[in-house]
Image: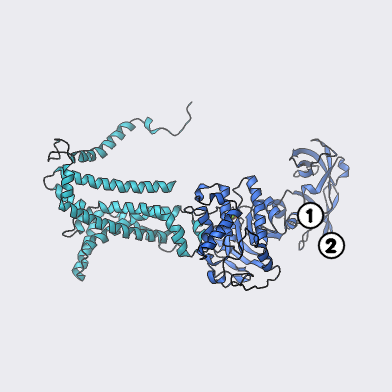
Amino acid sequence: MGIAFENQVAAPQLPSRPAYGDNQTGTHLPERAGSLNGVIVPEQPGKNAIEVRGVRKVFGTGENQVAALDTVSVSIRENEFFTLLGPSGCGKTTLLRLIAGFDFPTAGEILLHGQDIAPLPPFKRPVNTVFQSYALFPHMTVAQNIGFGLEMLGKPKAEIEARVAQMLKLVKMEALKARRTSQISGGQQQRVALARALAPQPKVLLLDEPLSALDYKLRKEMQIELKRLQHETGITFIFVTHDQEEALTMSDRIAVMSAGKILQVGTPRDIYDRPAERFVADFIGETNFLPGTVVSKHAGVATVKFASNATIAAGYPEGFDPTGEVTLVVRPEHADLVPDPVKGTIAGTLANIVYFGTDTHYHVKLDGGGENFIVRHQNSRSSPVTYATGAKVGIQFEEDAARVLKD
Amino acid sequence: MAEPRAMDIKDQPGFRSIAVICLLVLYVPVLILMIFSLNSGSLVTHWEGVTLGWYGSAFRNEEFHAAAKNTLIISVTATIVSTICATLAAIGMTRVKPWRGIAAAFMVINLPLMVPEIITAVATLSFFALIAGTLGLNFGIGNLILAHTVFCIPFAYMPIRARLEDMDLTLEYAAADLYATPWNAFRRITLPLLVPGIMSGAALAFIVSFDDFTITQLVAGPGQTTLPLYIWNQIRRPMTPEINAISTILLMVSILFVSVSFLIARRRAK
Ligand SMILES: Nc1ncnc2c1ncn2[C@@H]1O[C@H](COP(=O)(O)OP(=O)(O)OP(=O)(O)O)[C@@H](O)[C@H]1O
Ligand SMILES: [Mg+2]
């Protein structure tokens, strides 16, 4: 990304070069292309910014041991917008803290551009963090907060002032630069935290649920802003959220975590369309679960029979061998209602209709019992059929709609 | 029907009378002491008229000057040294990995609060007598400064530690994240945020040293009379309202420092 990075940062509001060199930080990290001494090192495409190898983190001792991270391995590429997604307590913050250097792994190693960073204290790691709680310095002004990193790197005063001005403009905080950070709103604090972390131009930016405190509209704005920033600076973003929609819309790749483990890493489309496990399908988007029996398998496609004797072809993830009783998952928008129950693969009674503006959810009580099956229809001016609660309906599946997943 | 809200203390039977008695017992003697410092007669029991003369004679009194000077030397030095020690101790007890014996260290720091002062006084006296006897060492007023420093440490320690514990640790992580070395993080982040705690600890230490009597009385050598000792010596003679004036001056200094400490603590709570 070396050359490209230089081109991108020629944009006026952007810092023009990496803020730290090996000389200041005392690291033994490889020179980055276009770094201070002007040596341009060609970079291999798709090089990894961060590699996490077999990392375990155990808190407590004896009875009270918790494995906050249970042998996690993942590679994060340069320039990538990488998201850690998972429920509360699954170990997202712990992983960020290990990368930032505030804590040490119980086992395993973390590489930054191919170098083990274990010997580097946090203040020597070219990684900056936007903290979950912002952690702005309350005794300093907005501008002093943003300039702090550069000041600590020993940058000349003029350079610091110029960079701070750029950053203030970037996050639209010029008017409030002389305010104390306790005298600005939550959304403004969040933007200052972002500017402060970006100012030294780290190689990797860690963002721990930075948008969670914002209202819906500001959050949407900041999501777009963050994407733009990431694209323009070429900094690798590791973004933590437990909002699946945010993860899907912003990320290049997502790692879905649960209870200290990474369950699946993939593009948003991968994760949504081809979830590797039931947990992933359940956590991301809405999903219907249907019981069935595998009757045959061929080339990654299983034929599954429902209680009603109807059958369906369903794909399954590599390395998983479904047999006997299984659970099928079907996204609500991959199924359709038909007025004639006999024409559907499965049948039931319309229990509930929920209108959402852009689309409508039909809750169908299946004849075979179990949980209600949800079908999602996008609303349009000319919806062909209207249904009423209590009507008998059939459910049809689109091709490839059903998948068999590990429980 | 009235909601079962928190009850109003003023509605409790007897509250008013008990409160009035307590306030009277506490403050009437002090009030009388202050009023008689303005008495134009020379008795502290018989009111004759108003004058500021006793303040004038107090300010011209050379023994009072010497005592005030001793007190200031001892209190200021003990305050500075004990506040520095307390700050270092508080950081060592809150900003490091829990170490073996941290609970014992906490006990040791706070022990002077629990040991009866007369015991500390006797022990300190015998200690200085011992080193004077065996090593021939006598630090003069340094003995008093040393003794005061030691018993001031826990008073300075408490507010500093409380402030450190209140402080958001993430701020220090953020500083490290932004390339601040541990020393820089301390100097630029922890220390400035700790200042209110340090000020309030120092104010407390000063007060405690300023009006200490028991330990000072036992340890002080000739020519080391402090203000509390001076007052003690005066009241064993026929008393004049001058002693009331001196006491009132001391009281004002104490009130000033307590208020400063209180105001700083309140600003920090906001
Ligand atoms: N210092 C600690 N001591 C003991 N247990 C800890 C510590 N830090 C984290 N844990 C535990 O490790 C697990 C993972 O915590 P972590 O903070 O990484 O979760 P998270 O995914 O960031 O959650 P959230 O979305 O709520 O922020 C939790 O079970 C937590 O209780
Ligand atoms: Mg977290």
Q: How many numbered discs sit on the rendered protein?
A: 2
Q: Quadrant of ligand 2?
A: bottom right
In the displayed orientation, state which residue is furthest to the left.
B238
Q: Is residue A233 left or right of residue A319?
A: left
Query: Residue A334 at what x, y percent from top left?
Result: 80, 49
Instruction: Say which element carries label 1.
Output: strand
Give above or below for A340 relative to B142.
Answer: above
Query: Residue A273 at what x, y percent from top left?
Result: 76, 55
User: The chain drawn cyan is chain what?
Assistant: B
Q: Earlier in the sequence, mark 1 or mark 2?
A: 2
Q: Which mark is residue A120?
A: none
Q: Residue at x 40, y 52 (%)?
A: B196
Give above or below for B198 relative to A79.
Answer: above
**Placement of the C terminus of chain A among the 4 image quadrants:** bottom right
In the displayed orientation, state which residue is furthest to the top.
B1
Is A248 in front, or is A5? Answer: A5
Colouring rule applied to residues: by chain
Rate crowding at label 2 as few (under 14), some (14 to 19) or many (20 or more) other CA atoms within 10 Å: few
* Residue named by callout 2: A299
Instruction: Say which element carries label 2.
Output: loop
User: What amino acid does circle 2 point to?
Assistant: Ala
User: The chain drawn blue is chain what?
Assistant: A
Observer able to see residue A91 = no
Query: Residue A125 at what x, y percent from top left?
Result: 56, 66
- Identify the chain of the residue marked 2, using the numbered disc in the image: A
Observer able to see residue A228 = yes
User: What amino acid does circle 1 point to?
Assistant: Arg
Tell me, yes or no, whether the two marked residues, 1 and 2, touch with CB atoms within 8 Å: no
Is B76 in front, or is A288? Answer: B76
- Identify the chain of the residue marked 1, using the numbered disc in the image: A
* Residue named by callout 1: A403
**Label 2 beta carbon within 8 A of ligand 1:** no
